[in-house]
Amino acid sequence: MRRKLFAAAMLAVVAATGLSACGSDDSSVLKVGTEGTYAPFSFQGPGLKLTGYDVEIIEAVGQKLGRKVEFVQTPWDAIFAGLESKRFDLVANQVTINDERKNKYALSQPYTTSEGVIVTKAGDTSISTLADLNGKTCAQSATSNWGKVATQAGAKVEAVEGFVQAIQLLKNSRVDATLNDTLAVAEYTKKTGDTGVKIAGKTGQTSQQAFAARKDDALIADVDKALNDLRADGTLAKISEKYFGTDVSK
């Protein structure tokens, strides 16, 4: 009997812990899912403090909403599952706007506009366009927009957790290419000085990125209003200039 009572008590503790892990209903807190490994958008800065373009913008949004932002670091391929299971309220991680995501989630107005590029080893001259990826292998996050672009081009996708891992596989000749946002690639090149890889071509696509909430969540209307205010007072442009030297928020 004691064992049964003890087991029941432990189950109750676990259940309570699990519920608290999903977040509270505290309206003063905005829980945000982000990778924390995707420079310059969301990464560990000095002292391992979470920072980046997306991080600073959503913190500015939080200030406009009068809510404290709490980040929940989550691998990209699990980030939408975390949103759907209510581990956090919003995803701030360069979510590319596309029809599939519009149907599944509430997306904010865009706060980034950029273009896609194809990255190969420096000495590779066989790839310069999307058509050249047919039959090749690309390292991509399985659920990312770039993974879908690679698949549609006829490439086999080798699943990775993020851009840095994709670059390592590329340099080790385990894949032929990786697709990503030109801003992320430029940041990697600037920080590492890596001459072992190059931008071999463009995907021919201009993409826009947004924050994502659960479908029909009224939160996204408040986020849009905050973004409008931040655009009007110059905050978006200032944060963008800090990370990219130009205004990519337009």
Image (cartoon, rainbow, N blue to C red):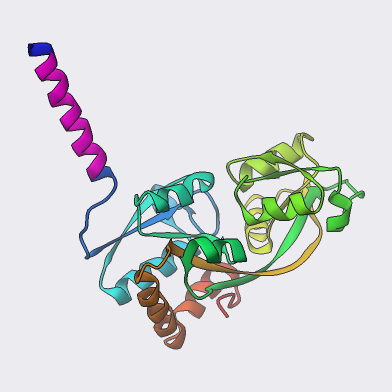
Total marks placed:
0
Q: From the viewer's perspective, is 111 left or right of 1?
A: right
Q: Is residue 28 above or below residue 233?
A: above
Q: Residue furthest bottom?
A: 232
Q: Is residue 201 above or below residue 133?
A: below
Q: Position of residue 157 (x, y in %)?
A: 72, 42
Q: Point out the stretch of residues depicted in magenta.
A: 4-19
The quadrant where residue 205 appears: bottom right
Point 75% across, 40% down: residue:
170
The quadrant where residue 214 appears: bottom left
Quadrant into which the N terminus falls: top left
Q: What secondary structure characterizes most of the magenta part? A: helix
Point 82% across, 48% down: residue:
154
Point 68% across, 50% down: residue:
147
Quadrant into which the C terminus falls: bottom right
The answer to whether residue 67 is visible is yes
Q: From the viewer's perspective, is 192 left or right of 213?
A: right
Q: Residue furthest left?
A: 2
Q: Position of residue 123 (x, y in %)?
A: 88, 46
| Residue closest to the eye, 79 or 179 | 79
The answer to whether residue 35 is visible is no
Point 43% across, 83% down: residue:
228
- Asked if residue 11 lies in the magenta stretch, the reply is yes
- Asked if residue 211 lies in the magenta stretch, the reply is no
| Residue closest to the eye, 242 or 250 | 250
Q: Position of residue 14 (x, y in %)?
A: 22, 31
Q: Position of residue 118 (x, y in %)?
A: 77, 55
